[in-house]
Amino acid sequence: MNPLDDPRCQCGYPLQRFWPHCPDCGRAQVWRDTAEISGDSCHHCGWAISPKFTYCPWCATMVYDERFSAKEPLKAPKGFRMDAKCDWGCGGGVQYPMPNCPWCGRRQTWNEDAQFEGDCPHCARGVDDWMDYCPWCGEDATGRDLIPKAIRQVRRLLKVSAVADWGYRILLRPGVSGVDPKYPKVVEIEQRYVTRARRRDEIPWPTLIGLVSHELGHSFLYHHWHWAQSRRFQRAFGEVRKAYRINDDAWVDFQRRRVANRPVNHVSGYAARHPQEDFAETFRYYITRRGRLRELFAELGSKRKGVPVYEKFLVLHDYVRSLRDWR
């Protein structure tokens, strides 16, 4: 098979042509002119180039040769296609995903919103949710390497709470934290909590742990959606399928570990907005308190909470225990 038709990393993973790194193992790639189509390779990086180029579009090294290089910028020399014009208006054509113009050597930008599911938290280039490594910079595409403390703490809380791993995948992404019901295992966390901090010790870890725990509650609910349709669940939390109209800008104190005094029948004010948020908040308090119902119920009594709050924790606790027994 022609390697151009089925390019693969040394680890065996299929690649898109001209990805600098493998998204599965992170290994750096070198795209040589093995099929001798373009007719030349960069003397600096070894990647395939056209002898007509003035600059290497991959490493920006000048490769001008007065014998072969074009006197004027071309649209698409042999072995390459024109996907766009140079951003700087030099008149030449560039092929995706060239980072530099092969004619003037200046940096190029590409709109990848329609091609990828998210952005790398390290280089802001396009990545998909399944990628472990960014195909552009080779760093952790999930962003979990930026919040190892929060990830370790949440995993420990889930373990001591006896909540079995349901295959969730935490991703640091720009935008709004949340979980898409169509992809219940993908948990996106707003990366501004990390990017706004100048140093690692400035990251609001308690808030981040609470936020991750809350979003994992949504993931857990969507993953066990059949349970959410049971009579006991609906009696405790309500109809989770009703229209979801929640303001994404609503403020939530995820750092708070103590149950709020009001409202009486919910663990927090945000929990009263929708049955799904009610469950996510209940889940957050359940795992951050390590599933210790005796301590939780003592606190609920001191806050004079209503009977429905007790029932919510019991419903969750019994289901978690049933999953553990089944496993």
Image (cartoon, rainbow, N blue to C red):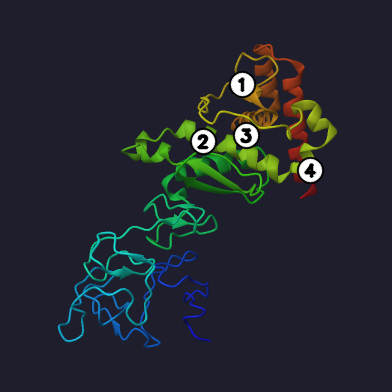
According to the picture, the residue beneath numbered tag 4 turns out to be: 226
According to the picture, the residue beneath numbered tag 2 turns out to be: 209
Q: CA distance from mark 3 to mark 4?
A: 21 Å
As helix, strand or loop, the secondary structure at mark 3 comes to helix
User: What amino acid is found at the position of numbered circle 1 in the picture?
Assistant: Ser
In the image: residue 135, left or right of residue 300: left
Question: For mark 2, does the 10 Å Cα neighbourhood hold few (<14), some (14 to 19), or many (20 or more) residues?
Answer: many
Q: CA distance from mark 4 to mark 2?
A: 27 Å
According to the picture, the residue beneath numbered tag 1 turns out to be: 268
Where residue 324 appears, x then y in whole percent? 75, 45
Where residue 116 appears, x then y in whole percent? 49, 57
Of mark 1 and mark 4, the one earlier in the sequence is: 4
User: What amino acid is found at the position of numbered circle 4 in the picture?
Assistant: His
As helix, strand or loop, the secondary structure at mark 1 comes to loop
User: What amino acid is found at the position of numbered circle 3 in the picture?
Assistant: Ile
Of mark 3 and mark 4, the one earlier in the sequence is: 4
Q: CA distance from mark 3 to mark 2?
A: 11 Å
Of mark 1 and mark 2, the one earlier in the sequence is: 2
Q: CA distance from mark 3 to mark 1?
A: 15 Å
Which residue lies most toward the left here? 66
In the image: residue 256, left or right of residue 300: left
Where residue 127 appears, x then y in whole percent? 47, 57
Camera-side residue of 323 and 172: 172
Q: Is 310 above or below relative to 134?
A: above
Of mark 3 and mark 2, the one earlier in the sequence is: 2
Give yes or no for contact between labels 1 and 4 (Cβ–Cβ under 8 Å): no
Disc marking residue 287: 3
